[in-house]
Amino acid sequence: MLSQQAQEALAQYQTGYSLPASLYNDASVFEADTESLFLSGWFYACHISEIQNVGDFVVLNIANESVIVVRVSEDSVQAHLNVCRHRGSRVCLESHGNSKNFACPYHGWAYGLDGKLLVSKEMPAEFDKSAHGLKAAAVEIVFSMVFVNLDSNAGSLSKNAKRIEPQLSQYGFEQTKVAYQETWTVEANWKLVLENFMECYHCAPAHPEYACSHSLKLPDRLSEKLYAPLQKRSQELGINGEPVYSGETDDPLLAVFHHRQPLLDGYVTGTEDGKPVAPLLGSFAGYDGGAADIQLGLFFYGVMYPDHIVLYSFLPVDAKSSKMHIVWLVRDTAEQGRDYDVDKLTWLWRVTTDADKTIILNNQLGVNSRFYEPGPYSEMEKFTQMFVDWYVDELRDNRR
């Protein structure tokens, strides 16, 4: 149930303008977001190379929920809610590792990798172990990336992702590995984090390192002349740069997106000097001076260069706190120190994310002000506006 203040803010929303403050800050809105979005959205858990061996696991925390993602067998990955079926304790307290089973640290109930209850001492004779296994979450592997959904009956992300399979398959995701990953915590509402990532209106003033190499900093009228030369170079190298956008009627929780942008003169990849930083990926035979932006679901995005991939996963924590988890992928045969240098590989998106953390925090501080009022979007914020309009419709529908 939305608070009275949140309901009034919802009624005041005007399309073309940012959200009223209560729709960012109100705890009742975060609870509504949890019920309608976080419990039914797909979240990135790990790259498949991180759980190669039977018993390998990672734990993913989404708002107030926790999920164990584990390699059960050579050909099976499962996800379990990290809640003991005895009295509700968290079962797995480590963020990742390898285990033969999961034992609750409170009373010693133990579960198999498949979630079935194995040990529950001193229970009545009529107690049914088979009815007290860990609850299941949905799990799908999409281009070697493992996604989970707290709704075990959720719609298929992997099925929708087939729309961009021709574009993503050329990167050879199944032949990549994690070179580095890092998590940033930002004291801001999850919507402010996503809205920032959905637009490049801020790129020129806030990200000079990114803006010197990526054409997305430009309005369409200035960047459009760069696309024909990129397409010509792409065709010569056999690179599929066809854009794919989810239709307007598609559920954004299952959205897919692929758009290839030209890099600016002198840059062939996303590095400080624009020069190659790792071996070419997949079927790439060379550099065409382009980079691809992708989206899978509402909470996952990526920037893909011919020699490395940067994955962005956004995780809500509470009404005024979020996490940004960034992963860098390289070819699985590449060796650190010989084929790539981690500092050079990660420089651009570490400095960009550091800056994002600051500007998003400042955005939240401004929204907190009693003097804040929604402002109009620019022409370069069309995706942010589309997201906010959709979000308001969802909130109104779920209030009914």
Image (cartoon, grey):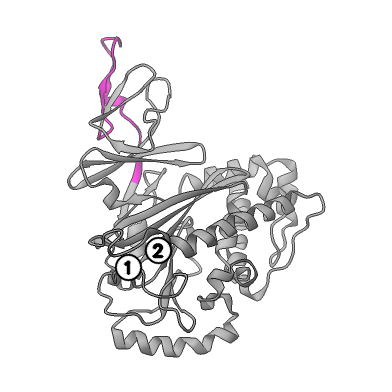
Q: Let me know if residue 296 is in the magenta part.
A: no
Quarter holding residue 329: bottom left
Q: Position of residue 262 (x, y in %)?
A: 46, 80
The range drawn in magenta is 113-138
Mark seen at residue 258: none
345 in relation to 182, above or below: below
Which residue is under mark 1? 278
Q: Residue furthest right?
A: 371
Question: Which quadrant does the N terminus fall into?
Answer: top right
Q: Position of residue 168 (x, y in %)?
A: 33, 69
* Amino acid marked by disc 2: Leu
Dot 1, how many residues are within 10 Å of its Cα: few (below 14), some (14-19), or many (20+)?
many
Q: Which residue is painted at 62% across and 46% down in the image? A: 187
Answer left or right for 207 relative to 153.
right
Q: Is residue 326 visible?
A: yes
Cα–Cα span, label 2 and label 1: 8 Å
Q: Is residue 37 visible?
A: no
Q: Which residue is painted at 68% across and 72% down in the image? A: 378
265 in relation to 95, above or below: below
Mark seen at residue 345: 2
Residues tagged 2 and 1 counted as in contact (Cβ below 8 A): yes
* Amino acid marked by disc 1: Ala
Q: Let me know if residue 132 is in the magenta part.
A: yes
Q: Nearer the viewer, residue 97 or 371?
A: 97
Q: Residue furthest left?
A: 74
Q: Which residue is painted at 45% across and 69% down in the image? A: 246
310 in relation to 244, above or below: above
165 in relation to 40, above or below: below
Local SS, label 2: helix
